[in-house]
Image: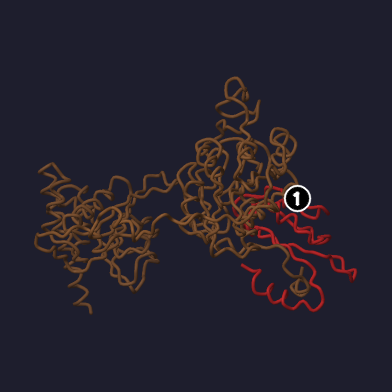
Amino acid sequence: MSDEVEMQYELAQSRSKTFYANFDRKDELQHQTHYCPGCGHGIIHKMVARAIDELGIQNRTILISPVGCSVFAYYYFDVGNVQAAHGRAPAVGTAVKRSRPGSIVVSYQGDGDLSAIGSAEILHAANRGENISVIFVNNAIYSMTGGQVAPTTLLGQWSTTTPGGRKAENEGYPLHVSELLGALEAPVYIERAGLGDNKQIAQAYRAVRKALENQVRGLGFSLVEILSPCPTIWKMSAVDAQHWVRDVMEKTFPLGVIRDRTKEAQPRKMPEAAVSTSEIPQLLGIEHEGPAESHAAPFVRPKTTNLQVRVAGFGGQGVLLLGEVLAEAGLDAGLEVSWLPSYGPEMRSGTSNCHVRLSDEAIDSPLVVRPDVLVAMNEPSLHKFYESVRPGGWVLYNGDAMPEGCDRSDLQVLARPFMQIANQLGDRRAGNMVMLGALLECTGALSQETIDKALGRMVKNAKWLELDKRALAQGRELLRESLKEVCHEG
Amino acid sequence: MADTGKRDRGSLRIDTDECKGCGLCVEACPPKVIHLSDELNHYGYPTATYVGAGCTGCGICFLACPEPGAITVLRLAHAGSSAAKAEMSEGVGR
Protein backbone atom coordinates (compact mmCIF):
# COMPACT_ATOMS: atom_id res chain seq x y z
CA MET A 1 0.00 0.00 0.00
CA SER A 2 1.40 3.38 -0.93
CA ASP A 3 1.85 6.15 1.64
CA GLU A 4 -0.62 8.27 -0.28
CA VAL A 5 -3.38 5.73 0.23
CA GLU A 6 -2.35 5.10 3.80
CA MET A 7 -2.79 8.77 4.65
CA GLN A 8 -6.53 8.18 4.50
CA TYR A 9 -6.29 5.80 7.42
CA GLU A 10 -5.99 6.54 11.12
CA LEU A 11 -4.64 4.44 13.97
CA ALA A 12 -7.14 2.03 15.45
CA GLN A 13 -4.97 -0.35 17.47
CA SER A 14 -1.26 0.16 18.04
CA ARG A 15 1.52 -0.40 20.51
CA SER A 16 0.57 0.84 23.97
CA LYS A 17 2.43 3.83 25.41
CA THR A 18 2.61 1.97 28.70
CA PHE A 19 5.26 -0.31 27.19
CA TYR A 20 8.84 0.92 26.99
CA ALA A 21 9.90 1.92 23.47
CA ASN A 22 12.84 -0.49 23.76
CA PHE A 23 13.17 -3.55 25.94
CA ASP A 24 16.81 -3.25 26.95
CA ARG A 25 17.09 -6.62 28.64
CA LYS A 26 19.17 -8.00 25.81
CA ASP A 27 21.56 -6.45 23.32
CA GLU A 28 19.45 -7.79 20.48
CA LEU A 29 15.71 -8.45 20.21
CA GLN A 30 14.91 -5.14 21.88
CA HIS A 31 11.50 -4.97 20.26
CA GLN A 32 10.31 -8.46 21.30
CA THR A 33 9.21 -9.87 24.62
CA HIS A 34 11.03 -12.98 25.88
CA TYR A 35 7.85 -15.05 25.72
CA CYS A 36 7.46 -18.06 23.43
CA PRO A 37 5.41 -17.70 20.23
CA GLY A 38 1.71 -17.86 21.12
CA CYS A 39 2.21 -17.30 24.87
CA GLY A 40 -0.77 -15.93 26.76
CA HIS A 41 1.43 -13.61 28.82
CA GLY A 42 2.01 -11.33 25.84
CA ILE A 43 -1.72 -11.05 25.19
CA ILE A 44 -2.48 -10.34 28.85
CA HIS A 45 0.41 -7.83 29.10
CA LYS A 46 -1.21 -5.95 26.24
CA MET A 47 -4.57 -5.99 28.04
CA VAL A 48 -3.05 -4.57 31.22
CA ALA A 49 -1.14 -1.93 29.23
CA ARG A 50 -4.24 -0.93 27.30
CA ALA A 51 -6.34 -0.66 30.45
CA ILE A 52 -3.64 1.54 32.02
CA ASP A 53 -3.69 3.72 28.89
CA GLU A 54 -7.45 4.01 28.85
CA LEU A 55 -7.73 4.83 32.55
CA GLY A 56 -4.84 7.32 32.33
CA ILE A 57 -3.03 5.83 35.33
CA GLN A 58 0.43 5.11 33.94
CA ASN A 59 2.12 7.57 36.28
CA ARG A 60 0.64 6.07 39.43
CA THR A 61 0.61 2.37 38.57
CA ILE A 62 2.97 0.06 40.46
CA LEU A 63 3.26 -3.41 38.98
CA ILE A 64 4.33 -6.28 41.21
CA SER A 65 6.11 -8.90 39.10
CA PRO A 66 6.03 -12.49 40.32
CA VAL A 67 8.36 -15.43 39.96
CA GLY A 68 7.57 -17.38 36.83
CA CYS A 69 7.87 -16.64 33.12
CA SER A 70 6.51 -13.14 33.75
CA VAL A 71 9.30 -12.32 36.23
CA PHE A 72 10.68 -9.89 33.66
CA ALA A 73 7.47 -7.86 33.37
CA TYR A 74 9.43 -4.88 34.68
CA TYR A 75 11.45 -4.83 31.48
CA TYR A 76 8.28 -4.17 29.51
CA PHE A 77 5.98 -1.92 31.55
CA ASP A 78 6.96 1.72 31.86
CA VAL A 79 5.33 2.06 35.30
CA GLY A 80 6.58 1.68 38.86
CA ASN A 81 7.88 -1.87 39.27
CA VAL A 82 8.62 -4.13 42.20
CA GLN A 83 9.66 -7.74 41.78
CA ALA A 84 8.51 -9.87 44.68
CA ALA A 85 9.75 -13.16 46.12
CA HIS A 86 7.93 -16.26 44.90
CA GLY A 87 4.21 -16.02 45.73
CA ARG A 88 4.57 -12.91 47.87
CA ALA A 89 3.25 -10.38 45.36
CA PRO A 90 -0.09 -9.77 47.19
CA ALA A 91 1.79 -9.15 50.47
CA VAL A 92 4.24 -6.77 48.78
CA GLY A 93 1.31 -5.18 46.96
CA THR A 94 -0.44 -4.64 50.29
CA ALA A 95 2.58 -2.79 51.65
CA VAL A 96 2.92 -0.67 48.52
CA LYS A 97 -0.76 0.24 48.48
CA ARG A 98 -0.89 1.11 52.18
CA SER A 99 2.26 3.21 52.12
CA ARG A 100 1.27 4.91 48.87
CA PRO A 101 -2.53 5.00 48.92
CA GLY A 102 -2.66 7.04 45.72
CA SER A 103 -0.92 4.35 43.70
CA ILE A 104 -2.65 1.74 41.56
CA VAL A 105 -1.16 -1.63 42.51
CA VAL A 106 -1.37 -4.50 40.05
CA SER A 107 -0.22 -7.90 41.26
CA TYR A 108 0.53 -9.99 38.18
CA GLN A 109 0.93 -13.68 39.00
CA GLY A 110 0.92 -17.12 37.44
CA ASP A 111 -0.76 -20.23 38.83
CA GLY A 112 2.41 -21.71 40.33
CA ASP A 113 3.14 -18.41 42.04
CA LEU A 114 -0.38 -17.58 43.21
CA SER A 115 -2.06 -20.92 43.84
CA ALA A 116 0.86 -22.97 45.20
CA ILE A 117 3.64 -21.20 47.06
CA GLY A 118 1.65 -17.96 47.35
CA SER A 119 -1.70 -19.48 48.35
CA ALA A 120 -1.50 -17.99 51.84
CA GLU A 121 -0.64 -14.48 50.63
CA ILE A 122 -3.47 -14.30 48.10
CA LEU A 123 -5.99 -15.75 50.55
CA HIS A 124 -5.24 -13.21 53.25
CA ALA A 125 -4.90 -10.24 50.90
CA ALA A 126 -8.34 -11.14 49.51
CA ASN A 127 -9.74 -11.69 52.99
CA ARG A 128 -8.54 -8.26 54.09
CA GLY A 129 -10.12 -6.84 50.96
CA GLU A 130 -6.94 -4.98 50.06
CA ASN A 131 -7.61 -2.36 47.46
CA ILE A 132 -5.39 -3.96 44.81
CA SER A 133 -5.98 -5.62 41.44
CA VAL A 134 -4.72 -9.15 40.90
CA ILE A 135 -4.21 -10.60 37.43
CA PHE A 136 -4.01 -14.37 37.84
CA VAL A 137 -2.66 -16.14 34.76
CA ASN A 138 -3.64 -19.81 34.89
CA ASN A 139 -2.07 -22.23 32.43
CA ALA A 140 -2.54 -25.28 34.67
CA ILE A 141 1.16 -26.15 34.89
CA TYR A 142 4.58 -24.93 36.06
CA SER A 143 5.96 -23.73 32.74
CA MET A 144 9.14 -21.80 33.49
CA THR A 145 10.66 -24.76 35.29
CA GLY A 146 9.80 -27.20 32.54
CA GLY A 147 6.27 -28.48 33.15
CA GLN A 148 5.76 -29.87 36.66
CA VAL A 149 2.31 -30.47 38.12
CA ALA A 150 0.65 -27.37 39.63
CA PRO A 151 -2.33 -27.17 41.99
CA THR A 152 -4.34 -26.11 38.94
CA THR A 153 -3.30 -29.02 36.68
CA LEU A 154 -6.35 -30.79 35.25
CA LEU A 155 -7.21 -34.36 36.18
CA GLY A 156 -5.52 -36.64 33.68
CA GLN A 157 -3.26 -33.85 32.40
CA TRP A 158 0.32 -34.79 31.62
CA SER A 159 3.18 -33.06 33.40
CA THR A 160 6.77 -34.12 34.01
CA THR A 161 5.84 -35.07 37.59
CA THR A 162 2.54 -36.72 36.60
CA PRO A 163 3.72 -38.62 33.53
CA GLY A 164 0.65 -40.86 33.65
CA GLY A 165 -1.68 -37.88 34.07
CA ARG A 166 -2.81 -36.20 37.30
CA LYS A 167 -4.76 -38.50 39.59
CA ALA A 168 -7.00 -37.13 42.32
CA GLU A 169 -5.92 -39.85 44.78
CA ASN A 170 -2.29 -38.89 44.49
CA GLU A 171 -2.11 -35.19 43.62
CA GLY A 172 -5.56 -33.98 44.66
CA TYR A 173 -8.09 -32.09 42.57
CA PRO A 174 -7.48 -28.97 40.47
CA LEU A 175 -7.58 -25.99 42.83
CA HIS A 176 -10.35 -23.53 42.01
CA VAL A 177 -8.78 -20.38 43.35
CA SER A 178 -11.47 -17.98 42.16
CA GLU A 179 -14.29 -20.00 43.70
CA LEU A 180 -12.24 -20.35 46.89
CA LEU A 181 -11.76 -16.60 47.16
CA GLY A 182 -15.36 -16.10 46.13
CA ALA A 183 -16.39 -17.72 49.42
CA LEU A 184 -14.79 -14.85 51.34
CA GLU A 185 -16.69 -11.80 52.47
CA ALA A 186 -14.32 -9.01 51.43
CA PRO A 187 -13.53 -9.31 47.69
CA VAL A 188 -15.44 -6.89 45.47
CA TYR A 189 -14.91 -8.48 42.09
CA ILE A 190 -13.73 -11.90 40.94
CA GLU A 191 -14.09 -13.15 37.40
CA ARG A 192 -12.62 -16.04 35.44
CA ALA A 193 -11.92 -15.30 31.78
CA GLY A 194 -10.02 -17.12 29.07
CA LEU A 195 -7.96 -16.68 25.92
CA GLY A 196 -9.65 -19.54 24.06
CA ASP A 197 -11.11 -17.56 21.16
CA ASN A 198 -11.92 -14.02 20.04
CA LYS A 199 -15.01 -13.75 22.20
CA GLN A 200 -13.17 -14.94 25.31
CA ILE A 201 -10.27 -12.58 24.63
CA ALA A 202 -12.60 -9.60 24.31
CA GLN A 203 -14.31 -10.54 27.59
CA ALA A 204 -10.94 -11.05 29.32
CA TYR A 205 -10.00 -7.49 28.39
CA ARG A 206 -13.23 -6.11 29.83
CA ALA A 207 -12.53 -7.98 33.06
CA VAL A 208 -8.93 -6.71 33.33
CA ARG A 209 -10.09 -3.16 32.78
CA LYS A 210 -12.85 -3.52 35.35
CA ALA A 211 -10.40 -4.88 37.94
CA LEU A 212 -8.21 -1.81 37.50
CA GLU A 213 -11.12 0.57 37.39
CA ASN A 214 -12.45 -0.79 40.70
CA GLN A 215 -9.16 0.13 42.31
CA VAL A 216 -9.20 3.61 40.80
CA ARG A 217 -12.65 3.99 42.37
CA GLY A 218 -11.21 2.69 45.65
CA LEU A 219 -13.68 -0.19 45.96
CA GLY A 220 -11.38 -2.96 47.17
CA PHE A 221 -10.01 -6.33 46.16
CA SER A 222 -10.45 -7.41 42.52
CA LEU A 223 -9.08 -10.53 40.87
CA VAL A 224 -9.27 -11.71 37.28
CA GLU A 225 -8.26 -15.27 36.58
CA ILE A 226 -7.34 -15.79 32.93
CA LEU A 227 -7.03 -19.25 31.44
CA SER A 228 -3.98 -18.89 29.27
CA PRO A 229 -2.26 -21.12 26.70
CA CYS A 230 1.28 -22.45 27.09
CA PRO A 231 2.07 -23.96 23.68
CA THR A 232 5.65 -24.86 24.62
CA ILE A 233 4.98 -26.94 27.72
CA TRP A 234 1.67 -28.31 26.52
CA LYS A 235 3.56 -29.37 23.38
CA MET A 236 0.97 -27.93 20.98
CA SER A 237 0.92 -25.35 18.22
CA ALA A 238 -0.18 -21.90 19.35
CA VAL A 239 -3.55 -22.31 17.68
CA ASP A 240 -4.13 -25.80 19.12
CA ALA A 241 -3.20 -24.51 22.57
CA GLN A 242 -5.73 -21.72 22.19
CA HIS A 243 -8.42 -24.25 21.29
CA TRP A 244 -7.40 -26.44 24.22
CA VAL A 245 -8.17 -23.54 26.57
CA ARG A 246 -11.67 -23.27 25.14
CA ASP A 247 -12.44 -26.97 24.60
CA VAL A 248 -10.73 -28.65 27.56
CA MET A 249 -9.61 -26.23 30.27
CA GLU A 250 -12.91 -24.42 30.41
CA LYS A 251 -14.70 -27.65 31.39
CA THR A 252 -12.72 -27.78 34.64
CA PHE A 253 -12.55 -24.01 35.14
CA PRO A 254 -15.89 -22.57 33.98
CA LEU A 255 -15.69 -18.96 32.85
CA GLY A 256 -17.82 -16.23 34.31
CA VAL A 257 -18.28 -13.72 37.08
CA ILE A 258 -17.87 -15.30 40.51
CA ARG A 259 -18.32 -12.15 42.59
CA ASP A 260 -19.37 -8.68 41.54
CA ARG A 261 -20.26 -6.12 44.17
CA THR A 262 -18.96 -3.16 42.21
CA LYS A 263 -22.43 -1.59 41.98
CA GLU A 264 -23.19 -1.54 45.70
CA ALA A 265 -19.62 -1.26 47.05
CA GLN A 266 -18.57 1.99 48.69
CA PRO A 267 -15.02 3.35 48.49
CA ARG A 268 -13.00 1.72 51.27
CA LYS A 269 -11.77 3.97 54.05
CA MET A 270 -8.60 2.98 55.86
CA PRO A 271 -8.71 3.61 59.62
CA GLU A 272 -6.61 6.46 60.95
CA ALA A 273 -3.26 5.41 62.40
CA ALA A 274 -3.50 5.09 66.21
CA VAL A 275 -0.47 7.32 66.76
CA SER A 276 1.61 9.41 64.40
CA THR A 277 5.22 8.49 63.69
CA SER A 278 6.50 11.53 65.56
CA GLU A 279 4.74 10.45 68.75
CA ILE A 280 6.34 7.00 68.88
CA PRO A 281 9.69 7.95 70.54
CA GLN A 282 7.81 9.75 73.32
CA LEU A 283 5.49 6.79 73.88
CA LEU A 284 8.48 4.49 74.12
CA GLY A 285 10.25 6.82 76.53
CA ILE A 286 13.10 7.56 74.17
CA GLU A 287 14.42 11.07 74.74
CA HIS A 288 16.84 11.48 71.87
CA GLU A 289 16.22 10.38 68.38
CA GLY A 290 19.22 8.99 66.57
CA PRO A 291 22.34 7.36 68.02
CA ALA A 292 23.38 8.01 71.60
CA GLU A 293 26.07 10.63 72.13
CA SER A 294 29.56 9.26 72.34
CA HIS A 295 32.33 10.56 74.57
CA ALA A 296 35.02 9.28 72.24
CA ALA A 297 36.83 11.68 69.94
CA PRO A 298 34.62 12.56 66.99
CA PHE A 299 35.24 10.36 63.99
CA VAL A 300 36.90 12.34 61.24
CA ARG A 301 35.88 11.12 57.86
CA PRO A 302 38.39 11.02 55.05
CA LYS A 303 37.86 13.38 52.15
CA THR A 304 34.56 12.98 50.36
CA THR A 305 34.30 9.61 48.71
CA ASN A 306 31.68 8.35 46.32
CA LEU A 307 33.30 5.70 44.18
CA GLN A 308 31.42 3.33 41.93
CA VAL A 309 33.35 0.48 40.36
CA ARG A 310 32.38 -2.29 37.98
CA VAL A 311 34.74 -5.27 37.69
CA ALA A 312 34.14 -7.78 34.91
CA GLY A 313 35.91 -10.74 33.35
CA PHE A 314 35.93 -14.50 33.04
CA GLY A 315 35.40 -16.71 36.06
CA GLY A 316 38.76 -17.52 37.64
CA GLN A 317 40.40 -14.18 36.88
CA GLY A 318 39.79 -12.96 40.40
CA VAL A 319 36.97 -10.57 39.53
CA LEU A 320 35.07 -11.12 42.75
CA LEU A 321 38.15 -11.10 45.00
CA LEU A 322 39.30 -7.77 43.57
CA GLY A 323 35.93 -6.29 44.46
CA GLU A 324 35.92 -7.87 47.89
CA VAL A 325 39.34 -6.53 48.85
CA LEU A 326 38.23 -3.07 47.77
CA ALA A 327 35.01 -3.28 49.78
CA GLU A 328 36.72 -4.74 52.89
CA ALA A 329 39.32 -1.99 52.83
CA GLY A 330 36.52 0.55 52.45
CA LEU A 331 34.92 -0.84 55.61
CA ASP A 332 38.21 -0.47 57.48
CA ALA A 333 38.37 3.14 56.33
CA GLY A 334 34.98 3.80 57.93
CA LEU A 335 33.12 4.15 54.66
CA GLU A 336 29.74 2.80 53.64
CA VAL A 337 30.38 -0.01 51.18
CA SER A 338 28.50 -2.48 49.01
CA TRP A 339 29.78 -5.45 47.03
CA LEU A 340 27.41 -7.24 44.72
CA PRO A 341 28.39 -10.18 42.53
CA SER A 342 26.18 -10.28 39.47
CA TYR A 343 25.00 -13.23 37.40
CA GLY A 344 22.31 -12.99 34.73
CA PRO A 345 19.84 -15.89 34.54
CA GLU A 346 21.06 -16.95 31.13
CA MET A 347 24.68 -15.97 31.57
CA ARG A 348 26.02 -19.34 32.57
CA SER A 349 29.02 -19.39 30.27
CA GLY A 350 31.60 -18.49 32.88
CA THR A 351 31.52 -14.72 32.81
CA SER A 352 31.54 -12.92 36.09
CA ASN A 353 31.20 -9.38 37.26
CA CYS A 354 30.68 -7.42 40.43
CA HIS A 355 29.50 -4.01 41.55
CA VAL A 356 31.41 -2.16 44.28
CA ARG A 357 30.45 1.11 45.89
CA LEU A 358 32.36 3.11 48.50
CA SER A 359 30.76 6.22 49.93
CA ASP A 360 30.69 8.67 52.82
CA GLU A 361 26.93 8.49 52.80
CA ALA A 362 24.47 5.65 53.07
CA ILE A 363 24.33 3.68 49.82
CA ASP A 364 20.92 3.66 48.22
CA SER A 365 21.47 0.77 45.84
CA PRO A 366 24.30 -1.72 45.49
CA LEU A 367 23.90 -1.62 41.71
CA VAL A 368 26.55 0.23 39.74
CA VAL A 369 24.93 1.31 36.51
CA ARG A 370 27.29 4.21 35.65
CA PRO A 371 30.73 3.26 37.01
CA ASP A 372 33.49 5.77 37.71
CA VAL A 373 35.99 3.01 37.08
CA LEU A 374 35.57 -0.02 34.85
CA VAL A 375 37.99 -2.89 35.37
CA ALA A 376 37.63 -5.06 32.25
CA MET A 377 39.63 -8.27 32.33
CA ASN A 378 38.67 -9.35 28.83
CA GLU A 379 37.37 -7.87 25.60
CA PRO A 380 33.71 -9.00 25.83
CA SER A 381 33.47 -7.41 29.27
CA LEU A 382 35.00 -4.20 27.93
CA HIS A 383 32.50 -3.99 25.09
CA LYS A 384 29.62 -4.81 27.42
CA PHE A 385 30.29 -2.02 29.93
CA TYR A 386 32.41 0.52 28.02
CA GLU A 387 29.55 2.83 27.11
CA SER A 388 28.23 2.85 30.67
CA VAL A 389 31.35 4.50 32.19
CA ARG A 390 30.76 8.03 33.44
CA PRO A 391 32.40 10.83 31.44
CA GLY A 392 35.76 11.58 33.05
CA GLY A 393 35.94 8.05 34.42
CA TRP A 394 38.69 5.47 34.12
CA VAL A 395 38.86 2.25 32.12
CA LEU A 396 41.45 -0.32 33.11
CA TYR A 397 41.65 -2.94 30.40
CA ASN A 398 43.60 -6.18 30.38
CA GLY A 399 45.01 -6.01 26.83
CA ASP A 400 47.87 -4.48 24.83
CA ALA A 401 45.73 -1.72 23.41
CA MET A 402 42.12 -0.65 23.33
CA PRO A 403 40.23 -2.54 20.62
CA GLU A 404 38.59 -0.78 17.71
CA GLY A 405 35.43 1.12 18.49
CA CYS A 406 36.50 1.92 22.07
CA ASP A 407 37.62 5.47 21.41
CA ARG A 408 35.64 7.75 23.70
CA SER A 409 37.56 10.96 24.22
CA ASP A 410 35.93 11.68 27.58
CA LEU A 411 37.55 8.73 29.34
CA GLN A 412 40.98 8.02 30.77
CA VAL A 413 42.33 4.65 29.80
CA LEU A 414 45.04 2.27 30.93
CA ALA A 415 45.34 -0.74 28.61
CA ARG A 416 48.09 -3.14 29.66
CA PRO A 417 48.54 -6.93 29.57
CA PHE A 418 48.01 -7.12 33.33
CA MET A 419 47.92 -10.91 33.48
CA GLN A 420 51.28 -11.18 31.69
CA ILE A 421 52.77 -8.52 33.93
CA ALA A 422 51.62 -10.57 36.92
CA ASN A 423 53.17 -13.65 35.34
CA GLN A 424 56.53 -11.89 35.28
CA LEU A 425 56.07 -11.09 38.97
CA GLY A 426 55.52 -14.76 39.75
CA ASP A 427 51.97 -15.87 38.90
CA ARG A 428 49.45 -14.65 36.34
CA ARG A 429 46.71 -15.19 38.88
CA ALA A 430 47.87 -12.03 40.64
CA GLY A 431 46.76 -10.02 37.58
CA ASN A 432 43.67 -8.89 39.45
CA MET A 433 45.86 -7.31 42.14
CA VAL A 434 47.94 -5.45 39.55
CA MET A 435 44.67 -4.03 38.26
CA LEU A 436 43.54 -3.21 41.80
CA GLY A 437 46.82 -1.34 42.34
CA ALA A 438 46.16 0.73 39.24
CA LEU A 439 42.59 1.35 40.40
CA LEU A 440 43.73 2.57 43.82
CA GLU A 441 46.29 4.84 42.22
CA CYS A 442 43.89 6.45 39.75
CA THR A 443 41.14 7.04 42.31
CA GLY A 444 43.28 7.78 45.37
CA ALA A 445 40.33 6.38 47.30
CA LEU A 446 42.04 4.37 50.04
CA SER A 447 45.42 4.35 51.75
CA GLN A 448 47.84 1.51 51.07
CA GLU A 449 47.71 0.73 54.78
CA THR A 450 43.99 -0.04 54.79
CA ILE A 451 44.36 -2.16 51.68
CA ASP A 452 47.21 -4.16 53.23
CA LYS A 453 45.13 -4.77 56.33
CA ALA A 454 42.12 -6.01 54.36
CA LEU A 455 44.30 -8.12 52.10
CA GLY A 456 45.95 -9.69 55.14
CA ARG A 457 42.55 -10.86 56.39
CA MET A 458 41.52 -12.33 53.06
CA VAL A 459 44.75 -13.88 51.82
CA LYS A 460 46.04 -16.30 54.45
CA ASN A 461 48.96 -17.77 52.53
CA ALA A 462 52.10 -15.72 53.25
CA LYS A 463 53.64 -16.41 49.84
CA TRP A 464 50.54 -15.20 48.05
CA LEU A 465 50.21 -12.20 50.32
CA GLU A 466 53.71 -11.13 49.47
CA LEU A 467 53.07 -11.61 45.75
CA ASP A 468 49.80 -9.69 45.94
CA LYS A 469 51.50 -6.76 47.66
CA ARG A 470 54.15 -6.62 44.95
CA ALA A 471 51.38 -6.84 42.34
CA LEU A 472 49.55 -3.91 43.94
CA ALA A 473 52.72 -1.81 43.93
CA GLN A 474 53.37 -2.73 40.29
CA GLY A 475 49.83 -1.67 39.37
CA ARG A 476 50.26 1.71 41.05
CA GLU A 477 53.55 2.16 39.22
CA LEU A 478 51.99 1.31 35.83
CA LEU A 479 49.37 3.97 36.32
CA ARG A 480 51.83 6.63 37.45
CA GLU A 481 54.00 5.91 34.39
CA SER A 482 51.02 6.19 32.06
CA LEU A 483 50.13 9.58 33.53
CA LYS A 484 53.71 10.78 32.95
CA GLU A 485 53.49 9.61 29.34
CA VAL A 486 50.34 11.61 28.84
CA CYS A 487 52.05 14.69 30.30
CA HIS A 488 54.99 14.32 27.94
CA GLU A 489 52.73 13.80 24.96
CA GLY A 490 50.56 16.72 25.99
CA MET B 1 -5.26 -3.74 -4.05
CA ALA B 2 -7.82 -3.65 -6.82
CA ASP B 3 -8.79 -0.02 -7.24
CA THR B 4 -12.54 -0.17 -7.34
CA GLY B 5 -12.76 3.37 -6.08
CA LYS B 6 -14.03 2.09 -2.74
CA ARG B 7 -11.40 1.77 0.02
CA ASP B 8 -11.28 -1.04 2.54
CA ARG B 9 -12.49 0.01 5.96
CA GLY B 10 -9.23 -1.07 7.52
CA SER B 11 -5.63 -1.87 6.89
CA LEU B 12 -2.72 -3.53 8.67
CA ARG B 13 0.92 -2.92 9.24
CA ILE B 14 3.01 -5.82 10.48
CA ASP B 15 6.48 -5.50 11.98
CA THR B 16 8.15 -8.63 10.62
CA ASP B 17 11.06 -8.28 13.06
CA GLU B 18 8.72 -8.49 16.02
CA CYS B 19 6.42 -11.26 14.74
CA LYS B 20 7.19 -14.76 16.02
CA GLY B 21 4.90 -16.56 13.60
CA CYS B 22 2.55 -18.11 16.16
CA GLY B 23 -0.39 -17.78 13.77
CA LEU B 24 -2.93 -16.59 16.35
CA CYS B 25 -3.81 -13.55 14.22
CA VAL B 26 -4.36 -15.79 11.19
CA GLU B 27 -6.81 -17.82 13.27
CA ALA B 28 -8.45 -14.74 14.81
CA CYS B 29 -8.99 -12.67 11.65
CA PRO B 30 -12.74 -12.76 10.78
CA PRO B 31 -12.37 -11.99 7.03
CA LYS B 32 -9.26 -14.23 6.84
CA VAL B 33 -6.96 -11.71 5.21
CA ILE B 34 -3.78 -12.63 7.14
CA HIS B 35 -1.54 -15.57 6.28
CA LEU B 36 1.92 -16.74 7.31
CA SER B 37 4.80 -15.97 4.96
CA ASP B 38 6.86 -18.65 3.25
CA GLU B 39 10.07 -16.73 3.94
CA LEU B 40 11.53 -16.68 7.44
CA ASN B 41 12.54 -13.48 9.19
CA HIS B 42 15.92 -12.66 10.76
CA TYR B 43 15.14 -14.85 13.77
CA GLY B 44 13.89 -17.82 11.77
CA TYR B 45 10.14 -17.33 12.13
CA PRO B 46 7.57 -17.20 9.34
CA THR B 47 5.74 -13.91 9.75
CA ALA B 48 2.16 -12.74 9.57
CA THR B 49 1.43 -11.12 6.23
CA TYR B 50 -1.55 -9.02 5.18
CA VAL B 51 -2.90 -10.20 1.83
CA GLY B 52 -3.35 -6.55 0.91
CA ALA B 53 -7.10 -6.19 0.73
CA GLY B 54 -10.26 -7.00 2.63
CA CYS B 55 -9.33 -5.73 6.13
CA THR B 56 -12.32 -4.41 8.03
CA GLY B 57 -10.24 -2.70 10.72
CA CYS B 58 -11.94 -4.69 13.49
CA GLY B 59 -8.68 -4.92 15.45
CA ILE B 60 -9.21 -8.47 16.69
CA CYS B 61 -5.83 -9.58 15.34
CA PHE B 62 -4.21 -6.93 17.54
CA LEU B 63 -5.90 -8.30 20.64
CA ALA B 64 -5.00 -11.89 19.76
CA CYS B 65 -1.33 -11.11 19.04
CA PRO B 66 1.03 -11.65 21.99
CA GLU B 67 3.66 -9.11 20.90
CA PRO B 68 3.26 -5.45 21.92
CA GLY B 69 3.78 -3.86 18.52
CA ALA B 70 3.92 -6.60 15.89
CA ILE B 71 0.55 -5.56 14.48
CA THR B 72 -0.78 -2.05 13.94
CA VAL B 73 -4.39 -1.74 12.83
CA LEU B 74 -5.54 1.24 10.79
CA ARG B 75 -9.06 2.36 10.08
CA LEU B 76 -10.35 4.51 7.25
CA ALA B 77 -10.48 8.06 8.59
CA HIS B 78 -13.67 10.00 8.50
CA ALA B 79 -13.52 13.09 6.35
CA GLY B 80 -12.00 16.02 8.22
CA SER B 81 -10.41 13.91 10.94
CA SER B 82 -7.14 15.78 10.71
CA ALA B 83 -6.21 15.17 14.33
CA ALA B 84 -6.11 11.47 13.66
CA LYS B 85 -3.88 11.99 10.63
CA ALA B 86 -1.51 14.16 12.61
CA GLU B 87 -1.29 11.53 15.31
CA MET B 88 -0.62 8.86 12.75
CA SER B 89 2.19 10.69 11.04
CA GLU B 90 3.87 11.26 14.42
CA GLY B 91 3.33 8.07 16.25
CA VAL B 92 3.22 5.03 14.01
CA GLY B 93 6.73 4.49 12.73
CA ARG B 94 9.27 3.08 15.09
Q: Residue at x 18, y 47 (%)?
A: A427
The answer to whether residue A202 is left or right of residue A335 is right
In the picture, one chain is red; tell me its letter: B
Q: Amino acid at mark 1?
A: Val
**Residue A38 x %, y %:** 65, 46
Q: What colour do you see for chain A? A: brown
In the figure, residue A197 lies in which quadrant?
A: top right
Residue placed most toward the observer, A216 or A451: A216
Which residue lies most toward the right here? B4
At mark 1, the secondary structure is: helix
Q: Is residue B26 left or right of residue A182?
A: right
Measured as percent of width and height from the top left, residue A100 is found at 48, 59
Q: How many marks?
A: 1
Residue A123 visible at all: yes
The quadrant of the rendering that contains the C terminus of chain A is: bottom left
Query: Dot 1, how many residues are within 10 Å of its Cα: few (below 14), some (14-19), or many (20+)?
Result: many
Q: In the picture shown, does residue A25 fall above or below B79?
A: above
Residue A29 visible in the snapshot: no
Give the residue drawn at x 77%, y 54%: B34
Compared across the picture, whether B58 is left or right of A353 comes to right
Quadrant where the N terminus of chain A is found in the figure: bottom right
Residue to which mark 1 is pinned: B26
Q: Chain of mark 1?
A: B
